[in-house]
Structures are given as structure tokens and as C-alpha cells.
């Protein structure tokens, strides 16, 4: 990993700076390194505010990026920044595209075709009908060469991922937590299958160790829809996260 990318990684761990603020920093300072090393007064002058600047200055004193990178390597996790050619073209087009993605899928035998991706999402409380519909739709999409994107949750997500694998296709699981966290634990086998058997990739913008919570799912959902040409909701309530993902897709 080069020095500049390491600074991108550092910013991805600090909770107060997301895509919008990071873009502001990058435009002002010209590089993540310059932004990371900037004096506190300069940071305050570009509208980060006193409180956030003080929190960041304290964070960068304590954070050991080299140790963090070693952790990533041990977990076989790679990173992809917004400026790299391999960054997903569709995702780059959304207004708040993640400036850094963590990716786990180190044994892929063939590259994943990110130009042909469809998200399949739905309720966690999936019915027998929902399982059947999800399986049929995913089997058809895989037959036409599409990669299946979902969120590795209970219910429809898990069915979509597993059906894609069983049908000989590829699948991408987007997490609403750190890439080292398996949530729910009951999907551990599926997580490892995707990450280690050359059938897809695990993706997250969240730093290592961050546990899932409801506040993180909208951010995850925008990545699911942003990675995809379209979103299929096979079963879901009117106020479900799946329909939020579909609305994201329409807006993107």
C-alpha cells in the first residue's frame, strides 16, 4: 500500500469525516496526506468546526495506521479508493460515493463483472413464497450473466446470495458494519463461502471492528443500490429497508 492510500485509510477510520467532508479536504489540500498533517487552525478555517477538528487532531495522535494496515493484511482485506481505475463505475456516479471500500474476496478465480450487477433484496421475515420467488428470479439473472448484490442479512438477502452461488454465479455482499464482523452470526458459513471460495466479494465502507446498528443500514443500502443497474425487491413491507434501497436506486 502506498503512502497516500494509507492516509485515505486513516480518514476512513475516523467517524466524523464521511464522503462529503473528505471531498472538501481533498479539494482544499490536494492530497489525503496534506489534509491529515494539516495544522488544527487550518482545518478549523475550512468549516470543519472547532469540536470536530479537536476530535480529529486527538484521533490522529493516537491512531497507528501501520498497525491497522497489518490487521487488514492478516484478514486478507484489500482497500479500493475512489480515484483508482478499478473503483466500480456505477457506484462512483452517486453523489455520496464512499471514498474508500474495504473488500474481502482474495481467492476469486475470475474478476467480477461489475458492469452487470443487479441487487436482490427484501424482508428478513421471508415467507415460503418469498423464498421461491427470490430463488427463481436469481436463477434467471445468473443465467443471463448478472452478478447478484445484496446485504447478507437474514431472509431474502441470504437466499439471494446462496442461490447465486448454487446457480454458478457471483455475488457481492455489502455490509452495514466492519468487514471483519459477521452479522448475523447465523450467516457465518455464507460469509466465508463468499469471501474464500472464489464466488464473490464482501464489501464495506465501515472500519474494522464497527458493530452493526440501525443507523448504519441506510449508508449500506445506498452502496447496494449504487453498485447495481437495478434493484429487485422480492418481498418486503411498505416501510422496509429493502424499499428504501429501491428508492435509492431510483434517485441514483
Image (cartoon, rainbow, N blue to C red):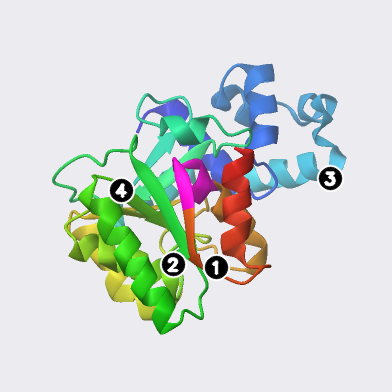
Query: Residue at label 1?
Result: 211
Judging by the rendered image, the residue that carries numbered circle 3 is 51
Q: Nearer the viewer, residue 228 or 42?
A: 228
Numbered disc 2: secondary structure? loop
Counting from the top left corner in percent of width and height, residue 123 is at 52, 72
Q: Spatial distance from mark 4 to mark 1, Cα to Cα?
A: 27 Å
CA neighbours of label 2 inside 10 A, class few (<14), some (14 to 19), many (20+): some
SS label for mark 1: loop
Q: Nearer the viewer, residue 73 or 19?
A: 19
Count residues near mark 1 (Cα–Cα under 10 Å), then give few for <14, some for 14-19, many for 20+: some
Separation of disc 3 and disc 1 at Cα? Answer: 24 Å
Q: Residue at x 67, y 26 (%)?
A: 25
Q: Residue at x 55, y 26 (%)?
A: 33
Residue 83, placed above or below residue 170: above
Q: Which mark is residue 56?
A: none
| 153 in magenta | no
Q: Which residue is mark 2?
A: 181
Mark earlier in primary sequence (2, 1): 2
Residue 161: percent from the left, percent from the top? 33, 63
| Residue 44 placement: quadrant | top right
Alpha-carbon neighbours of circle 4 within 10 Å: few (<14), some, or many (≥20)?
Answer: many
Amino acid at each position: 500500500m502506498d503512502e497516500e492510500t494509507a492516509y485515505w485509510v486513516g480518514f476512513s477510520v475516523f467517524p466524523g469525516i464521511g464522503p462529503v467532508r473528505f471531498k472538501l479536504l481533498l479539494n482544499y489540500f490536494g492530497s489525503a496526506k496534506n489534509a491529515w498533517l494539516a495544522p488544527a487552525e487550518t482545518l478549523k478555517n475550512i468549516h470543519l468546526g472547532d469540536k470536530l477538528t479537536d476530535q480529529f487532531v486527538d484521533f490522529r495522535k493516537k491512531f497507528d495506521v501501520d498497525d491497522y494496515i497489518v490487521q487488514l493484511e492478516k484478514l486478507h482485506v484489500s482497500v479500493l479508493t475512489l480515484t483508482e481505475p478499478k473503483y466500480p463505475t456505477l457506484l462512483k456516479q452517486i453523489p455520496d460515493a464512499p471514498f474508500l471500500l474495504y473488500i474481502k474476496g482474495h481467492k476469486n478465480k475470475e474478476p467480477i463483472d461489475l458492469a452487470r450487477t443487479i441487487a436482490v433484496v427484501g424482508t428478513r421475515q421471508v415467507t415460503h413464497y418469498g423464498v421461491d420467488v427470490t430463488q427463481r428470479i436469481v436463477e434467471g439473472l445468473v443465467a443471463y450473466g448478472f452478478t447478484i448484490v445484496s446485504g447478507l442479512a437474514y431472509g431474502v438477502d441470504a437466499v439471494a446470495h446462496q442461490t447465486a452461488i448454487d446457480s454458478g454465479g457471483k455475488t457481492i455482499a455489502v455490509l452495514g458494519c466492519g468487514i471483519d464482523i459477521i452479522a448475523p452470526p447465523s450467516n457465518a458459513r455464507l460469509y466465508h463461502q463468499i469471501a474464500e471460495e472464489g464466488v464473490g466479494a464482501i464489501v464495506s465502507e465501515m472500519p474494522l471492528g464497527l458493530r452493526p446498528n440501525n443507523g448504519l443500514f441506510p449508508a449500506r443500502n445506498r452502496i447496494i443500490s449504487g453498485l447495481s443497474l437495478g434493484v429487485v425487491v422480492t418481498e418486503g413491507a411498505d416501510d422496509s429497508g429493502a424499499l428504501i434501497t429501491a428508492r435509492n436506486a431510483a434517485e441514483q
